[in-house]
Image (cartoon, rainbow, N blue to C red):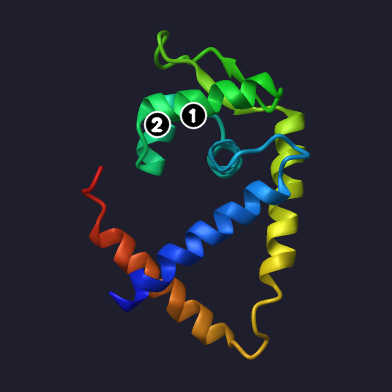
Amino acid sequence: MEVFGLVGPLYRRVQRRIEQDAPAEGLSVGVRAVLDLLRENGPMTVPQMGRAQSLSRQFVQRMVNDATEHGFVEAIPNPAHQRSSLIRLTDAGSAAITAVTGREHALLREVGGDLTDAELTTCVRVLSRMLALFDDVD
């Protein structure tokens, strides 16, 4: 529970910082998450994105609509399912998420320099196991 006690506030603070630093690109935390997901996975449907992020389809659709208004994503035909278009990054969306993640990485590099690669690997391993424990939660 101590890990959750630290991760929760850390997550909320990082998200607030992202929103404070990202208005130039027009990125809310939700739009940023959609762009990041598409960058990592390629074109996806809104329901696929919702499942991947454990978010409601309606919320993801609103974020996709916002991203579309800014020209960051576009809908393309889905050969597997006519009623559910694929959403893909545009060049503008790719540039926006690259700029935001570059700033985030630069900021996070300021974390204490005495952490070892082994400590970071262990931290990621612990958090990954904790996340897996709750895979069944929607």
The quadrant in which the N terminus is found is: bottom left
Residue found at x 44% / y 34%: 49
The quadrant in which the C terminus is found is: top left
Measuring from the top left, give residue 5's x and y in whole percent: 36, 71
- Name, please, the residue furthest toward the left: 136
User: Where, by quadrant of the figure, is residue 89 drawn?
Assistant: top right
Say which amino acid is labelled 1. Answer: Met
Residue found at x 76% / y 48%: 99
Q: Is residue 45 something that shows in the picture?
A: no
Say whether marks 1 and 2 touch (CB < 8 Å). yes
User: In the rendered view, would you say 53 is above or below 70?
Assistant: below
The residue singled out by tag 1 in the image is 44
Indicate left or right for 104 with 35 as reference: right
User: Where, by quadrant of the figure, is residue 17 drawn?
Assistant: bottom right
Label 1: few (<14), some (14–19) or many (≥20) C-alpha neighbours in 10 Å: many
The residue singled out by tag 2 in the image is 48
Measuring from the top left, give residue 121's x and y in whole percent: 49, 78
